[in-house]
Amino acid sequence: MRIRALLLSTAAMLALTGPASAETIIDALVSAYQNNADLMAAREELRVTNEQRPQALGGWMPTVTLRGNADEATIDQRISPSYDRRTLSGALEYNQTLYRGGALSATLDQAENTIRRQRALLTDTEQTVLLQAGSIFMDVIRDSRTLALNRNNIAVLEERRRTTRALYDVGDATQADLSQAEARLAQARAQLIAAQGQLDASRATYAQIVGQPPEAPEMPGPVSGLPETLEAAIDLAERWNPVLRASGLAETIARDQIRIRRGEMLPSVALVGRVQEDSYDDPLPLDRQSQASLGVQLTVPLYQSGADHARLREAKKRANQRQLETVSQLRKVQEQVIRAWRDLQTARASVGALDEQIAAARLALESVRREVEIGRRPLLDLLDAQQELLDAEVNRTGRQRDVVVGELTLLSTIGALTAESLALPTDLYDPLADYEATKWRLFGTGIR
């Protein structure tokens, strides 16, 4: 089952159901996909890596060299008079490797696998950027709501202080009641300042990741298409997680290196040719000489100071290391999926529990208010009940943020938090376009 089919409806369920002018999480993801500097740099890194294929292909191609030489010599003879000789030489040399112990094909395979690994790393960067964009989008919503709750709390406490002041003036409230009301109001104002600072910081981070300041972000709906079981999520992650795929390709690249090192120890065959013409300016009758040659050159390495053996052993040990790193990465991915799954379930359960707490806190606040009004309870109980309701509402806002981020994190662990899998409404970057334009490009230095 392909991930895109599994998550076909994800984008629709992420869309906002609020007013058309509001900024949705899809808007934030699209903007980050188009503008994030880290993601654009990763795309350029892939373009750089694509050049490894024509470089490896160059091992099969001939080298043609033109050489020229000019010299002047004085010939001093005992019998004949001395004279000056001027010589002009030109040579065209051709060299093409036909066989190098399998190292040529191994080098080409290594280049291809290196490019595939870089594509997987680009996917990982894309997922990281989109997860950051989704997370900071939810951070702005959380901090905006927290700021609004604190402002509302200040309005309530200011009204409570005015009421307490009026009661104090007529002798129905004590100085302690008034001081408590003023202390809670001062505390609320301090909390408001902290909430405003947190929102400003989140908005700055949003602009850095997404590429533009947030504009009235609205809470998204739930993500659809998530795996139904933890086992299904782990299975998808083992097949599609880009970091795990990159680790497996790193092992393949290391084994290609073994083939390259082994080929360097085997005989090589090359086709060599040379055309040379010498021109002399002297009294001798021979004033021009031409020669041409074409042949096959066999090179058999017998002993190369032992360095070739050491390089081969190094390549084998490196391959063993990469194999163990792949096993380690597999276990890390499994742990990440399990952690993301459990965190998401915890966040969802917490939201439900906090809804119940808020409902109970509102009833308690109303009951305490009535009892304070008739003098059965002190004002401090009412202030405590008001603070408990505020804390519960702020906590619920934070846990609602955790649910959405947890859903995005789970998508990321299974390799599905990409523009293609989410069907984002934007032109998708094609990682194969530059590769196709580059893979046979053996001439030219310009770039596009």
Image (cartoon, grey):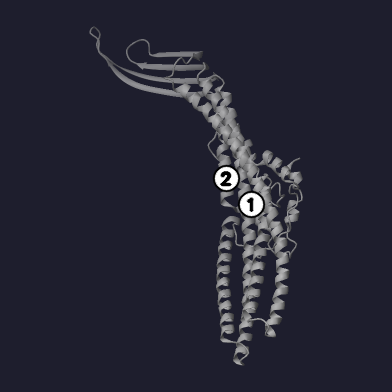
Residue 130 image label: 1
Name the amino acid, label 2. Ala
Q: Position of residue 79 (x, y in %)?
A: 23, 6
User: Image height check: is 274 above or below 422?
Assistant: above
| Comes first in the chain, label 2 or label 1 | 2
Mark nearer the viewer, 2 or 1:
1
Quarter of image, res 60: top right
- The residue beneath circle 2 is 42
| Image quarter hosting the C terminus | top right
Q: Residues within 10 Å of mark 2 (few under 14, many from 20)?
A: some
Q: Nearer the viewer, residue 1 or 66?
A: 1
Question: Which quadrant holds residue 166?
Answer: bottom right
Give whichever of 322, 166 is nearer the camera: 166
Snapshot quadrant of residue 134: bottom right
Q: Which amino acid lies under the numbered mark 1 shown in the image of this protein?
A: Leu
Badge 1 marks a residue whose secondary structure is: helix
Is any atom of residue 355 visible in this view?
yes
| Residue found at x 54% / y 35% | 444
Residue 411 image offset from top left, x and y in percent: 68, 48
Residue 262 coordinates in the image, percent (x, y):
53, 21
